[in-house]
Amino acid sequence: MPQTIRQSVTLAASPDRLYAMYLDAKTHAAITGQPVKISAKPGSAFSAFEGSIWGTTLAAVPGRLIVQSWRSINFAEKDPDSILILAFSSATTGGRIDLVHVNVSDQDAEGVRKGWKTYYWTPWKKHLTKH
């Protein structure tokens, strides 16, 4: 049965900057250490981690919200796309990202859950201390 992953992180940057960093291919790649294809344009394709994840940007509200459909190489063909929702808001020490990732396939859920922390939140914090 598909799973829902919920995580929140506070980072030392404004919500507008965090939103822009995620959607800027060069900055996104600098954070994750991997090339990425990404855009805020609804209907645009994205891919990351050498094509191991891919999908489509469904909606983007500047500085506030990103919604994407997602798949990974670990999804079975019959698995539905997962939906990623990133909501950006202000926090006392910068910006907060609330993540809700729904319809994550059972076989990929633990990897996705850990992956957000390992490949996004931790490196993003390090990136912000340097820039």
Image: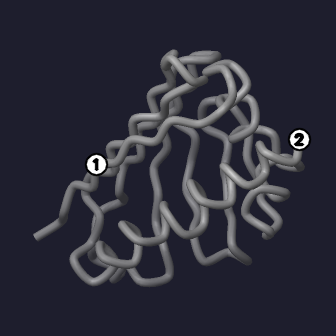
- Which residue was labeled with disc 1? 6
**Can you tell which of label 2 and label 1 is closer to the viewer?**
2
The span from disc 2 to disc 1 (Cα, nearest Å) is: 27 Å
Residue at 85% of width from left, 57% of height from top?
A: 30
> Identity of the amino acid at label 2?
His
Residue at 41% of width from left, 46% of height from top?
A: 84
- Which residue was labeled with disc 2? 131
Q: Is residue 131 above or below residue 64?
A: below
| Front residue of 9 and 106 | 9
Q: Is residue 120 above or below residue 33?
A: above
Q: Secondary structure at mark 2?
A: loop
Residue 39: x and y, percent? 73, 38
Residue 6: x and y, percent? 28, 48
Quadrant including the C terminus: top right
For residue 17, side relative to residue 68 (left or right): right
Residue at 49% of width from left, 29% of height from top?
A: 96
Toward which corner of the image does residue 34 lie, by quadrant?
bottom right
Residue 77: x and y, percent? 36, 80
Quadrant including the N terminus: bottom left
For residue 84, side relative to residue 12 (left or right): left
Residue 105: x and y, percent? 27, 72
Instruction: Sort mark 2 into few (<14), some (14-19) or many (20+) by Cα contacts within 10 Å.
Output: few
Q: Secondary structure at mark 1?
A: strand
Q: Is residue 30 above or below residue 86?
A: below
Toward which corner of the image does residue 106 lie, by quadrant?
bottom left
Residue at 29% of width from left, 64% of height from top?
A: 104
Toward which corner of the image does residue 13 lie, by quadrant?
top right
For residue 20, side relative to residue 67 (left or right): right
Instruction: Sort mark 1 into few (<14), some (14-19) or many (20+) by Cα contacts within 10 Å.
Output: few
